[in-house]
Image (cartoon, rainbow, N blue to C red):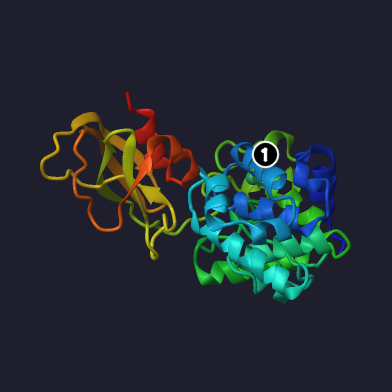
Amino acid sequence: MENAFSATILNWYSAFGRDLPWRRTRNPYAIWLSEIILQQTRIAQGQAYWERFMAHLPDVQALAAATEDEVLRLWEGLGYYSRARNLHVAARQIVAMGGFPDTLEGIRALKGIGDYTAAAIGSIAFGIPAAVVDGNVYRVLGRHFGIETPVGTSAAKKEFTDLAQSLLPEDRPGDFNQGMMDFGALQCTPANPACITCPLAASCAALREGRVESLPVKKAGATVQVRPVTYVYLRCNGQTAIRRRGPGDIWQGLWEPLTEILPGLEPHLLKSGVRHQLTHRTLIADFYLAETDRPPALPNGYQWIQEAELDRFGKPRLFELLLQSLP
Ligand code: SF4
């Protein structure tokens, strides 16, 4: 469907869209990888990870053949590790299918892919006319069309998806979707949008009615919990003790140091009150170092490894922070 709104977005995207390496290809693996990495990560940080993955695991066969430890290590520092685990599982699904699925339903059926990511990959890699709806799209559409429905409700999801779908130009769905994301990230930004230079200003309801600040309407957010954490780095004859996190949490498959002070050890405090922000939780960590010549009995699940081997184990960011604070 040709309409003034999408024509403006497409023109703007041609002139101002970001030049990113995964936009220079139609390779679904490269595009999928970028979408998963960028789900919770800023582009500047995500690009380095994308390049690392493409260098080490250049295609879906390589990713499927990698071990979980290899994948988690490449992912280390990005957070939300379930993304990496799902990526790995999905690579094996794709190889078992004999190739990357090229329908929306096929892509949606892969592990770790929701409506948004399926529409993004489908439209960009295969030209499937499916509109994406993310925070940027809510903001741009909410402001331009003056929509009051609170974002985060199922009513909003339906309303914004239907609207985005009706605006989608069938011949360039990938460019339109990427144009909307960039437009929301660069022009119609959450704070201080650049209305003065905006090519949609003449038709923008929020600008006309003085509602730019109040749109889109947000639903009250989830509360953030605070959780204390104790991390003890044990050093004993060139070895340290770590354990792998079990299923059922965000750090599943990653390795962590001792999380309690063992009897008989007299660790000294390295840092207190280190804040680490997760989606719905703030961790406040105390870091200790315990040095001893006599190996203590380790709690369940822990194993000794050479300190020099620590690099080989995938670790959450908080553990990296502990390592950085070691003398
Ligand atoms: S005029 Fe301002 S609020 Fe309206 S679409 Fe443009 S940047 Fe966004």
User: Percent position (x, y) of residue 39?
Assistant: 58, 53
Binning the other alpha carbons within 10 Å of mark 1 as few (below 14), some (14 to 19) or many (20 upward) gives some
Q: Foreground residue, 29 or 135?
A: 29
**Location of mark 1 (residue):** 186
* Ligand 1 sits in quadrant: top right
Q: Foreground residue, 172 or 1?
A: 172
Dividing the image into 4 quarters, which one contains the C terminus? top left
User: Percent position (x, y) of residue 138?
Assistant: 61, 56
Write down the quadrant of residue 156 in the picture. Answer: bottom right
User: Percent position (x, y) of residue 95?
Assistant: 72, 68
72 on left or right of 134: left
Q: Give the residue at x 62% y 38%.
A: 193
* SS category of the residue bearing label 1: helix
28 on left or right of 268: right
Dividing the image into 4 quarters, which one contains the N terminus? bottom right
User: Percent position (x, y) of residue 181?
Assistant: 68, 49
Furthest residue toward top: 327
Visible in this render: residue 316? yes
